[in-house]
Image (cartoon, helix red, strand yellow):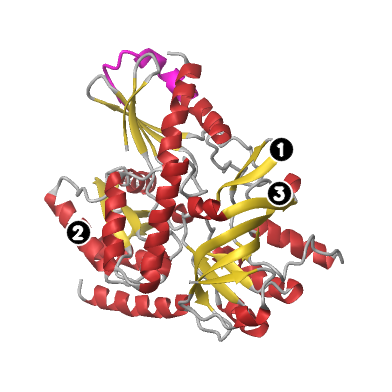
Amino acid sequence: MESEVLAKNLVEPIEKAVTTLPEATLSALKAARDREEEGARVQFEAMLEAVEIGEKEGIPICQDTGTPTFYVRAGRDFPGMASLDDVQKGIRRAVQLATEEVPIRPNTVHPLTGKNKGDNTGKLIPWIDWSVVEGSELEVTYLPKGGGSTNMSQLTMMTPGRGLKGVKEIVLERIASMEGKPCPPTIVGVGIGGSASIAMNLAKKSLLRPVGESHQEPEIAELEEELKERANNLGVGPMGVGGKTTVLDVKIEYDYRHPASYPVAITPQCWANRRISFKITPEGEIEEVER
Amino acid sequence: MKTLKTPLDKEEVRQLRVNEPFKVTGKIFTARDAAHEKLLELEEEGEEPPFDLSAYPCFHCGPVMKKENGVWQVVSAGPTTSIRMEIFEAEFMGKFGTRIFIGKGGMGEETSEALQRHGGVYAQFTGGAGSLMAGSAEEVEEVHFLEELGVPEAIWVIKVREFGPLLVTMDSTGDSIHRDISEEVERNLKQELETL
């Protein structure tokens, strides 16, 4: 695989990801608009119009396309396994090309000096989350998640004695306290267990699941549903102007934890829940682009 | 929906009330954290701002811009989180006379007091709707401090037609939707936690 070939091929899916919304998110927004009135409805109408213009004109729906993050699931029998390094290089190069060509806003600045590198790359950015899975495919999801929602992330190392009730309290308190800042209605990613870093990673990864799709374990799905319903009773509303829709969904992922630790990580995703998933062939071509 | 024209009519701005949606036709300028800091710094050194900051709405925004055939164009320009500018805005209003601030997420008590003092409003443009704003942008008229601050932080003066919908969420009487919603959410949260 030639990393330069892959890079050129990746610009189009990156563009599609930032200029469109997945169907499940779009229909959830439409359903929410139909429930709302006055100021809240005005917000949904503006959102839906922005999506329409983005798609029609091929321009980013939101100017904030975040810190470029890619989730790569490499099938252990992927014929191009020997060139995974080229995938890494290709993604990095693709981000530089897309920054220029789409264009997307250069968002990577030095943490201390604030100097903007201008091409959306850093030391390890674009961040690539690798996992090795069954099968022979190489699947990638690109998640352009803005800074406003990411700034509302929170990690709590909860006292284990507070138990499940404590988890619910933490999630609801956070959704209430972040008000309009993460651009609601949000999709709230919750990571429970693991360690501090694992929990935050789980919270973000939970956002990869489409809006409306529950966790496959019934107990977790039930918890997601309860938190979603309660969150929508809070009355934050779209963009924090009040209303019935505060969240489009609550997503939970968990892993086993240390008996003395009970990490609860939260990261909300804004209503402009952009992403794209696709497969890369051993030759660096893109296949089966999904929203 | 009401459309405000620039240069702004002070009395018209003073009369805007919370929950009122409106649009803007004319000119707006973008200013985020670094631009606020820069303008206030220059003022302290006795320098004049690059244009009359009181005549146009200040938009909390770091846009995506593109230069085509030597001409700047707005690609996508939604609002950024306004509360970051809370440390500047009261002083900004006092020094430059700016009366409309557009952003998202609302601002705090210091800004609310300054809005009352100067007859200003804070309006929210729907976060994430950058493409919608771009659709109303007709021309990029000026850019200031681009070299020094970079594209998102520079001050862009943009000619717009029917930019909006903008929702007044803080007005010159001291009303604030953000304050009201905060209190309501606090009550609702209490109720949810009691029934867990």
Which residue is identified by label 3? B149
Say if B98 sits above or below A67 in the image: below
Which mark is drawn over residue B70? 1
Q: Residue at x 27, y 44 (%)?
A: A209
Labelled pair 3, 1 in contact (Cβ < 8 Å)? no
Q: CA distance from mark 3 to mark 1?
A: 20 Å
Q: Depth check: B9 or A23 in front?
A: B9
Amino acid type at mark 3: Leu
Outermost residue to the left: A218
Segment colored magenta: A73-89
Q: Chain of mark 3?
A: B
| Mark 2 vs mark 3: in front | 3
Residue B36, image x and y in percent? 69, 62
Q: Depth check: B42 or A266 in front?
A: B42
Residue A117, image x and y in percent? 63, 37
Which residue is identified by label 2? A225
Question: Which numbered disc, 3 or 1, marks the residue that appears first in the sequence?
Answer: 1
Neighbor class of circle 1 (other Cα within 10 Å; few <14, some 14-19, many 20+) is few
Residue A259 makes an appearance in the image: no
Q: CA distance from mark 2 to mark 1?
A: 52 Å
Asked if labels 2 and 1 share a chain, the reply is no
Residue B52 makes an appearance in the image: yes
Amino acid type at mark 2: Glu
Residue B64, image x and y in percent? 58, 46
Q: Depth check: A112 or A56 in front?
A: A56
Q: Chain of mark 2?
A: A
Q: Is residue A87 magenta?
A: yes
Labelled pair 2, 1 in contact (Cβ < 8 Å)? no
